[in-house]
Image (cartoon, rainbow, N blue to C red):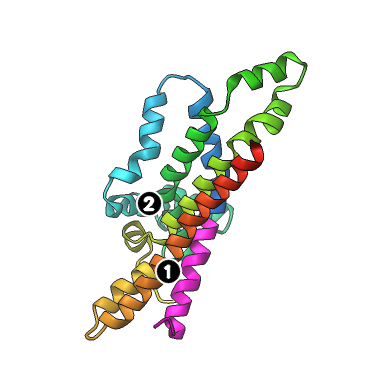
Amino acid sequence: MFDLTPAELEALRLSVKVGLVSMLASLPVGFALAYLLARREFPGKSLVNGLILLPLVLPPVVTGLILLMLFGSQGPLGKFFAETFGVTFAFRWTGAALAAAVMGLPLMVRAMRLSIEAVDRRLEFASRTLGAKRWWTFVTITLPLSLPGIMAGAILSFAKSFGEFGATITFVSNIPGETQTLPIAIYSILQTPGGDGPAWRLALVSVAVSMVAIVGAEWVERRIRSKSA
């Protein structure tokens, strides 16, 4: 059942690559946003939170269209990255990773924010009154106690990135070996006669990988919390 063809293995490999890159690239951004929302009060906080969560409620095609306008070859950010860093996103796997990062960021930020908000502020205040610097209090108290949420958010972001379809195909199209991730490969196979069997095979692989990621997130969270306790 899981004897995948070379093309299907390539789609699986690309999906894992895109998921890992998008997760790692968005991790510092996600944590910074989560910490800002959890620990700071500032004008427009609700607006910032709404913008972060917007990809969850927008049609993925709309998100992909916005990315195409901003990061396409003629878009302002696309030109900037191409001319400054030599990185292009349109019709490249890097664009698929960017789309996956945008779609997975809300889940990452939400999990991290809840974990940071659950840290007892009295422990941080006690550390400061005992003479610890703010950065040392963060490294020794805030970060370790919020680590379960950080890990869970990262893994959930990977699972979301792994299954991303709408924004990806709108932004970077369907190019085998370059942007054809597992969900796009399933869609392509379904468009061909007699493709139900291979499509179900890839769907089962996708479900298996996603379930491993979700169960792994809960297992890691429990392990870290038990050690912290």
Write the residue at 53% across / 24% down.
Answer: 39
Q: Is residue 17 magenta?
A: yes
In what element is the residue under mark 2?
helix
From where the camera sits, is residue 71 visible?
Answer: yes
> Residue 72: percent from the left, percent from the top?
40, 56
Viewed as shown, does residue 33 lie left or right of 1? right
Numbered circle sitting on residue 158 = none
Please give the label number shown on residue 179.
1
User: Where residue 142 sits in the image (x, y, percent)?
Assistant: 63, 30
Compared with 189, 133 (above or below) is above
Q: Residues within 10 Å of mark 2 (few under 14, many from 20)?
A: many
Camera-near label (2 vs 1) is: 1
Disc 1 is placed on an element classified as loop
Which quadrant of the rendered structure holds the C terminus?
top right
User: What segment is highlighted magenta in the picture?
Assistant: 1-22
Which quarter of the rendered picture does the N terminus lie within? bottom left
Residue 227 percent location from the top left of the image? 66, 42
Q: What amino acid is labelled 1 in the image?
A: Thr
Query: Does the rendering let one see residue 181?
Result: no
- The front one of 2 and 72 is 2
| Label whose residue precedes the other's in the sequence (2 or 1) | 2
On screen, residue 29 versus residue 159, left or right, reads right
- The residues bearing labels 2 and 1 have C-alpha atoms spaced at a distance of 15 Å
The prevailing secondary structure element of the residues shown in magenta is helix
Labelled disc at residue 67:
2
Q: Residue furthest left?
A: 193
Q: Do the residues bearing badges 2 and 1 touch, measured as CB atoms within 8 Å?
A: no
Return the residue nearer the eye: 132 or 69.
132
